[in-house]
Image: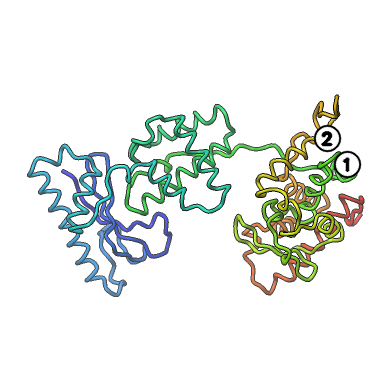
Amino acid sequence: MATVTIYLDSRFSGEKESPFKAVIVQGRKSAMISLGLKAYPHQWDPDTCKVKEEHPNHRLLNSILAGKKYTIEAEILRLEMSGKLDSMSIMEIRDAADLALHPGKEISRGKEKTFLFRYERFMSLKTRKNTINGYKWALNRLKEFDPQLSKRSFEDIGVDYINDFRAFLGKTVCANTCNVSMRYIRAVFRDAIKAGITTAYPFSDVKMKRQQTRKKALMPEQMRMLASCECRGNQEEYRDMFLLMFYLRGVNIGDLLQAEKSSIVNGRFEYRRSKVGTLFSIKLEPEALALIEKYRGDKYLLSPLDHYKDYTDYLHHLNYGLKTIGAPRGKRDKIAGEGLFPGLSTNWARHTWASCGLNIDIPVEVISRGLGHSGALSVTQIYMDFDMKKVDEANRQIIDFVLYGKDYRKK
């Protein structure tokens, strides 16, 4: 017979107020029902399964929880006496018990509880284009791996399934790309658990090892070569965009191209990074100002989006152009070999700024602040102006070192 236990589900809420759930266990499978009540973890005794006396309404809460548990157990007993229990899945038992707790409630059935339905629903709530594309890519790989995906419940996707899928991905992509897809799937599981759809969570036993990637940074002498090399056609614009990103401490290309004209305030470039929402304020050095003036746009601060439908469209041409700078030319001026930096892309600007800073002994903390790492920003406002001045000085020193060979280090 199935058993029932009252549980405070604080897995994803930490020390915050957490929901009470009833856990139904049958054999080796379990399911949860949300009970519509909450308490803080320190107010709950998991050994006695009761609310502690420190809760102001502990008696009332314990009485309500006991009543809900009794209702669920009574429904399970009714199913057993009718001979239906043995042929029911754990999710069907959960639905019957949920209906007993909430008479007249519409119980979600069929495809609405499948993994695919919840994945597509979760994906539809995302707003950033790159994130949506990432979820779509992972979903397409899942469909290639499992043609029966539309029929899978969360309980069907266990540890072996996840590991087999990762092995499938590993045939064509690197370990870090696999990990990104795993995180997407994990997020869908967590969302379904919070919604009371499932209790399954295979990721407790899934290890995601990060693969060391090749350093994506140009050395100072390579940056000098890039800044002074001969460019053809649009290559000059692509090179300048990369340099501008570097002068602006490795600013994200999407944030840069979508910046409004009003983002320049008192000689500083101010914007909010779309990925994390962090507010940045970067002093505009003469080199950066010259490029902004050179490529000043009509609609935005810069001109590329005057001619391209969105920044991702431009980014495709930009990254290709960076890779072909300095490449030998053949007949009809066609590219006939690799460029000076065949792996170069906009992602390198951020890494290059940090790497060049370390080369001239800029403190790691200052570089972290310049990059906007969240840990580096958790300081009181009274220190922010002081830290900003140090970052501004570091950026000037990095630019001087890279472009002009000036080294401010004490000999």
Which amino acid is tagged 2?
A: Leu
* Mark 1 vs mark 2, CA separation in Å: 9 Å
Camera-side residue of 89 and 387: 89
Q: Is residue 401 left or right of residue 300?
A: right
Residue that carries the numbered disc 1 in the rendered image: 225
- Give how far across and how far down residue 262 sits, in percent: 72, 67
Pointers 1 and 2 in contact (CB under 8 A)? yes
- Give how far across and how far down residue 209 sits, in percent: 55, 38
Q: Label 2: how many residues lie within 10 Å, few (<14), some (14-19) or many (20+)?
A: some
| Residue at left offset 90%, top offset 53% | 407
Mark toward the start of the polypeptide (1 vs 2): 1
**Residue 333 appears in which quarter of the rendering?**
top right
Which amino acid is tagged 1?
A: Met
- Give how far across and how far down residue 300 sits, in percent: 72, 59
Camera-side residue of 267 and 52: 267
- Give how far across and how far down residue 116 sits, in percent: 39, 41
Q: Label 1: how many residues lie within 10 Å, few (<14), some (14-19) or many (20+)?
A: some
The mark found on residue 328 in the picture is: none
| Residue at left offset 43%, top offset 45% | 120
Camera-side residue of 254 and 234: 234
Residue that carries the numbered disc 2 in the rendered image: 340
Furthest residue toward left:
81
Which element is circle 1 on? helix
